[in-house]
Image: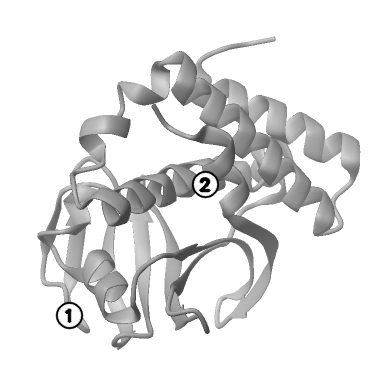
Amino acid sequence: MIEVTGQVTAVRRTVGERVLEAGTARTATVGQVYDTGVEDLWDAVTNPERIPRWFLPISGDLRLGGRYQFEGNAGGTIERCDPPKSFFATWEYGGQVSWIEVRLAPEPDGRTRFELEHIAHVGDDIWNQFGPGAVGIGWDQGLLGLALHLATGKSAPDEVGPDWSLTDEGKEFTRQSGEAWYAAHVASGADGPTARACADRTIAAYTGETE
């Protein structure tokens, strides 16, 4: 059984903007502190043998300039890499290109902070329909998998894979994640009713439930 509320509240979420060469992009950032050292966390998020234990099977050349591909999901190019601190890569899916930046930082107590920033040029029509939760809920699921893997060493997808997301527990996780992204959206300066409508639509899309 997953401690849904504990995991959702352990994650820090922010919504903002970032200026790229192609113009200003929207950002959704997730962060969580894990009870492990920087080197181990770096290995967990870059080692092709460990990544499937908390996220998805991956193939490709996982080094600077290399191409990667997640099974049934996004692929891209690793554009910057500074082990064991950070990497920056394109995130290519459905004909669209966005970017992710992963940052690791040691905490004073020996734990390590993980941050992932998803950067995308999103039009107002899509943003005003679904908001940051459209990608944020998916990354929350990833951080849950990473937390379980680091805590047990086991393969988290065996416990919280696609089938789990359709269980009552999985849907509750999605609802709480969606509510947390609603709060982050409002905190970024978004209009409350607009953010509320975005969150409701996104939660419904993930859970398959309608009002």
Measured as percent of width and height from the top left, residue 146 is found at: 34, 53
- In the rendered structure, the answer to whether residue 125 lies left or right of residue 167 reads right
Q: Which corner quadrant holds the N terminus?
A: top left
Horizontal relation, residue 191 to residue 43: left or right: right
Q: Position of residue 35 (x, y in %)?
A: 40, 65
Q: Which residue shows up at 42% across the image and 32% down it?
A: 2
How many labels were placed on the picture? 2
Q: Is residue 58 above or below residue 183?
A: below
Relative to the observer, which residue lies in front, 11 or 100?
A: 11
Report whether residue 145 is seen. Answer: yes
Q: Quadrant of residue 85?
A: bottom left
Pick whichever of labels 2 and 1 is earlier in the sequence.
1
**Residue 205 appears in which quarter of the rendering?**
top right
Where residue 177 sits: x, y (%)? 60, 38
Whether the residues at callouts 2 and 1 have beta carbons within 8 Å, the answer is no
Instruction: State the residue at coordinates (22%, 72%).
Output: 43
Residue under circle 1? Answer: 63
Residue annotated with mark 2: 135
